[in-house]
Image (tube, rainbow, N blue to C red):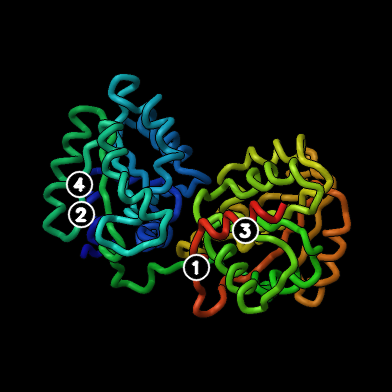
Amino acid sequence: MIETKKLFKFLKKEKIDFFTGVPDSVLKTASSFLESKKEKHFITTNEGSSIAMAIGYYLATKKIPCVYMQNSGLGNAINPLISISHKKVYSIPMLMIIGWRGAPGIKDEPQHNVKGKITKSILKLLNIKYVILNNDKDLKKLKKLIKFSKINSVPVAILLKRNILINNNSKFQKKISISNKIQRCDVIEILLKIIKKNTKLIATTGFTSRELNQIRAKKKSNKGNDFYMVGGMGHSSVLSLGVSTKTKHDVICLDGDGSFLMHLGSIVSIGKKSRKNFKHLLFNNFSHESVGGQSTNIDKVNIEKLIKSVGYKYYFLLKKKREIKNKLKIFLKKPGPSLLEVRIKMGSMKDLSRPKNLIKIKKNFVNSF
């Protein structure tokens, strides 16, 4: 194991003091440390943007930047890594810290196991040298890797498995304070009671999918058909759009603020192409709650003006618990594309399980049409 503070102290000695990335549960102590220390630190909406910001920093300073992400985010990062920073293009040095979900030998979810198995192969295809950090002794390998990056002007990477990076200082933990009293599960429970029987529900990855799955199982509701985005963060809304174009029934996307922002351009397609049956329900607690509670930086965004500017017809805001049922009914009756923003507090259901037998879930959803 490696203490978070020690890792960043080491990086500072190596003159790496600019950090950008997308929060990850494996690296949550790292992003919490950076936020608490007020370092040169920027949370971006997706990993490709983080790579681009890092490249911009290097161009302006000639100093090596650091980008952190979960290995699932490598897909978003590949474009700028290949087309801008690659040795045969602009040859930009940088250090990537990658949370290695689904690492061989570690039990994880199916989507993480798939990506975890090929993570090293992806880095090799990108010609990115890497080290696997397991303890303090491996920092010597990292020192050589950083030197290689500087000399050859190329990206390099660290792979970190779960529970390797630890935090021995509770002051690192910084979470967004939300005054709202609504919980995500409060809304989902009522929603399942009032939707039409053939409504299609697509839930974003993380706690939203897991809570919908668990409430569905406990309440044994027969209204609606669910599809859980166990991966593919940021794509729930446009996937819902794809479903909505081929059915007359209501399609409700249960989205989160981090997912909403990750591929924000999807709302332009929704505003332009969606039908009246498209409903966008946005759970907003201004944070990446599922991976540690880091800020999504959405708190200053006027979501109503944003979505109406791209063609959404209606916007609703839900902030009071006593108004849940009434607001949901109004939202569901209005023709889409429409969006209901629900301000929720941090926290999820206890003993939260995960969707199992994904192939069966897919078949049940497909057969519901």
Rendered image: mark on residue 131 = 4
User: Helix, strand or loop at disc 3?
Assistant: helix
Rendered image: mark on residue 354 = 1
71 horizontally vs 275: left or right: left
Q: In front here: 273 or 50?
A: 273
Which label sits in the foreground, 1 or 3?
A: 3
Which tag, 3 or 2, sits closer to the chain's start? 2
327 horizontally vs 352: left or right: right
Q: Which residue is mark 2?
A: 133
Give the quadrant of the N terminus. Answer: bottom left
Q: Are marks 2 and 4 in contact (CB under 8 Å)?
A: yes
Which label sits in the foreground, 2 or 1?
A: 1
Which tag, 2 or 1, sits closer to the chain's start? 2
Q: Are marks 1 and 4 in contact (CB under 8 Å)?
A: no
Q: Which residue is mark 3?
A: 364
Q: What's the CA distance linking mark 1 and mark 4?
A: 31 Å
Q: Are marks 3 and 2 in contact (CB under 8 Å)?
A: no
Q: What's the CA distance linking mark 2 and mark 1?
A: 29 Å
Residue in the image at 70% along x and 43% along y: 241
Q: What's the CA distance linking mark 2 and mark 4?
A: 6 Å
**Amino acid under label 2?**
Leu
Q: What's the CA distance linking mark 4 and mark 3?
A: 43 Å
Residue in the image at 59% along x and 68% along y: 213
Q: Is residue 202 above or below residue 163?
A: above
Give how far across and how far down residue 138 sits, in percent: 14, 54
Residue 21 at least partly seen = yes
**Amino acid under label 1?**
Arg
Which label sits in the foreground, 1 or 4?
A: 1
Q: Is residue 43 above or below residue 361?
A: above
